[in-house]
Image (cartoon, rainbow, N blue to C red):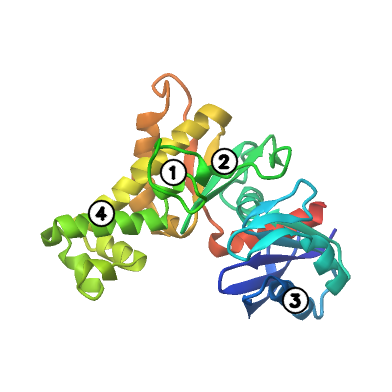
Amino acid sequence: MGLTIGVDIGGTKIAAGVVDEEGSILATCKVPTPDTPEGVIDAIADAVRTVSEGFEVEAVGIGAAGYVDDKRATVLFAPNINWRHEALKDKVEQRVGLPVVVENDANAAAWGEYRFGAGQGHDDVICITLGTGLGGGIIIGNKLRRGRFGVAAEFGHIRVVPDGLLCGCGSQGCWEQYASGRALVRYAKQRAQATPENAEILLGLGDGTVEGIEGKHISDAARQGDPVAIDSFRELARWAGAGLADLASLFDPSAFIVGGGVSDEGDLVLDPIRKSFRRWLVGGQWRPHAQVLAAQLGGKAGLVGAADLARQG
């Protein structure tokens, strides 16, 4: 199969792109994300039709946040769009006249990194995305492992602290409450409140108040040597690395790929994640260590991965 289209559904925009067999994006289109579930489907179809003009496109892959069934056809649950057992494949196919494959967005991003990014050369890869929440994907034996019902790799909702912080999923102590962009902001606010004298740079980048601290301020302040910002990244990394050590006990991959917005900070966050991973890896002094790699495709991973999954059917 030749050219396919990948679609990445975001909270504010829907991106579609024509992707070739080498993972190169030949054309892109972005449209605002509508407020209604049916409006999102119409917007996906509009973006596909727009971006496909002038190309011989053979299939469409859609990355959707939420649980996707084992047939890659129905979104069982998408919290941000309010889809419940939404027959996304059939509805989009009816509108665009092309075969459609639906995949969880983190799975699509993991596949994109495995095929065309940091995972090249590895047969067994575990991906995590450190964004607002924490997502992931499992590639073992060169295959994307989705589980019997299609909803594997929801790593963010592994409970790491019994009776811990309340998660948006309704549970308590989920990993993403301790290793995510949202957690990073919480750490920084707590530390700035306790020791404002150590957060002068951080507070100065916002409105001067603890409440005004945002993720971008923490990154900028850490690069300028702000103690609170640096310590906040270290706390996030401690939890992230410990979680990877647990995943190593489950899957024993040759590489972990860390993506998402938090990973854009590079070694500022990756070096302490690697340190924590080595610290908590069971039998670490006696066994081989998986590599902990930075994702390479950035925000394109989900779109490219979805397009390639559509190519494979």
SS for callout 2: strand
Upstream in the sequence, badge 3 or badge 1?
A: 3
Place residue 280 in its image quadrant: top left
Q: Give the residue displayed 59% in from the left and 68% down from the top.
A: 10
Left or right of 256 in this view: 282: left
Upstream in the sequence, badge 3 or badge 2?
A: 3
SS for callout 3: helix
Q: Gap in Å between the C-alphas at discs 1 and 2?
A: 24 Å
Q: Mark 4 Cα within 10 Å, few/some/many (few <14, many 20+)?
A: many
Residue 311: % across, % down: 80, 56
Q: Which residue is mark 1?
A: 172
Of 135 and 241, nearer the camera is 135
SS for callout 1: loop
Q: Quadrant of the N terminus?
A: bottom right
Q: Give the residue displayed 17% in from the left and 62% down from the top.
A: 199
Question: Which residue ends up furthest to the left in the rendered image?
Answer: 197
Q: Which residue is mark 2?
A: 126
Upstream in the sequence, badge 3 or badge 4?
A: 3
SS for callout 4: helix
* CB-based contact (under 8 Å), mark 3 and mark 2: no
Please give the label number shown on residue 230: 4
Q: Which residue is mark 3?
A: 42
User: Can residue 214 be seen by looking at this rendering?
Assistant: yes
Residue 60: % across, % down: 78, 64
Left or right of 289 in this view: 219: left
